């Protein structure tokens, strides 16, 4: 093989899926390089609200297992929140019942019906991982580097031309053009970050059939308010009118939000697909291409479960 093939594995994509997959491979002894078009801080993952919860992701048959495997990792990382950016935080999923969820829900510790004093209506109470992505993504990258991996800013236009025996495609929405896979579509999410008026618990009120939802996540950098789920919308520019409606919806649930100072507007494009693509493909020259993309609004939620499966598909080190 030529010198470029000594890298063993190249992971294409540097968001939460790419970094986690690369880390799992590196800690299994593989020589791994991540090629990313932009640093993790500028990926869709960086603007995620990042509450652990299977949201807008299929197929349900596999999602529960991927999510539970990831939950176990986040519970361990939450012991070092300042380092990892992961905390276990209490909150309420309004309008959600256990019976409406998959079998995975019964295996989530402390997930139960909310009591009358916790929310006035049907809801679930849980103590779940809430991940501060501006802290977590750099932590993942540093742990990858410590395991011998590397991260390079490189643009890939042809997966089959990447010079490595194993190529792992974690390009998210980029897979639409790169594979190409027209089944990958953007679901635009807009968030508003405000100065936290003292809220310590998260709250979601999500209608998956609507392009608008209401949620608030207390993060170290402020209170994250959401949100939207606009299918096939590509704009990364925050819409001021949408931002006003987001704040108004959240303030209707927590009135103290109404006067909170706006710190930041965020927009991200979730890489939606009818089902996650997690499979191994043989390239014409016999090399291995592993696809791991299409995680919709739940990339953080399933990252570790999918990474471990992808690492298994990559095969053992040569």
Image: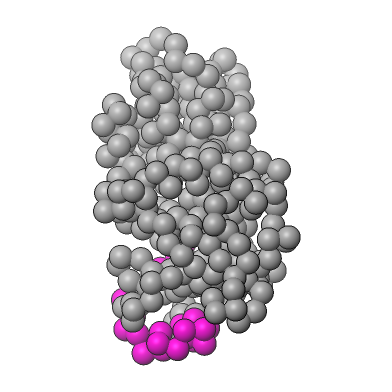
Q: Along the line of sight, which residue is nearer the eye, 317 or 269?
A: 317
263 part of magenta stretch: yes
Q: Nearer the viewer, residue 225 or 242?
A: 225
**Magenta segment:** 247-268
Q: Locate residue 78, reporting x and y percent.
A: 37, 50
Q: Quadrant of residue 204?
A: bottom right
Q: Position of residue 213 (x, y in %)?
A: 58, 73
| Position in image of residue 307 (x %, y %) | 50, 35
Query: Where residue 21 sits in the image (x, y, percent)?
Result: 45, 35
Front in this rendered view, residue 293 or 175: 293
Quadrant of the rendered structure where residue 129 is?
bottom left
**Magenta stretch containing residue 7, yes or no?**
no
Whether residue 133 is situated above or below residue 212 in the rendered picture: above
The vertical placement of 148 against 264, above or below, is: above
Out of 310 and 200, give the one closest to the viewer: 200
Quarter of the figure that contains the C terminus: top left
Q: Which residue occupies 49% across, 16% down?
A: 316
């Amino acid at each position: 093989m030529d010198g470029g093939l000594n890298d063993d594995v190249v992971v294409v994509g540097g968001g939460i899926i790419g970094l986690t997959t690369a880390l799992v491979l590196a800690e299994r002894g593989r020589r791994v390089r991540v090629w990313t078009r932009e640093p993790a801080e500028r990926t869709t993952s960086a603007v995620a609200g990042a509450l652990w919860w299977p949201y807008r992701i299929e197929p349900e048959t596999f999602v529960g297992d991927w999510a539970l495997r990831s939950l176990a990792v986040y519970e361990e990382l939450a012991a070092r929140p300042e380092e990892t950016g992961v905390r276990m935080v209490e909150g309420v999923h309004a309008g959600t019942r256990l019976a409406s969820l998959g079998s995975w829900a019964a295996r989530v510790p402390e997930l139960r019906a909310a009591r009358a004093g916790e929310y006035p209506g049907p809801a679930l109470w849980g103590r779940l991982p809430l991940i501060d992505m501006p802290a977590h993504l750099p932590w993942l990258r540093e742990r990858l580097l410590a395991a011998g991996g590397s991260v390079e800013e490189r643009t890939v236009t042809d997966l089959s031309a990447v010079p490595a025996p194993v190529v792992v495609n974690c390009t998210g929405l980029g897979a639409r053009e790169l594979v190409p896979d027209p089944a990958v579509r953007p679901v635009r999410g807009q968030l508003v970050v405000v100065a936290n008026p003292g809220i310590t618990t998260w709250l979601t009120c999500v209608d998956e059939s609507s392009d608008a939802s209401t949620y608030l996540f207390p993060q170290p950098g402020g209170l994250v308010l959401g949100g939207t789920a606009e299918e096939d919308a590509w704009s990364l520019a925050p819409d001021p009118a949408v931002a006003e409606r987001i704040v108004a919806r959240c303030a209707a649930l927590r009135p103290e939000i109404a006067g909170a100072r706006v710190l930041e507007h965020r927009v991200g494009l979730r890489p939606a697909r009818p089902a996650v693509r997690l499979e191994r493909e043989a390239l014409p020259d016999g090399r291995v291409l592993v696809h791991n993309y299409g995680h919709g609004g739940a990339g953080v939620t399933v990252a570790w479960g999918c990474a471990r499966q992808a690492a298994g598909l990559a095969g053992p080190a040569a």
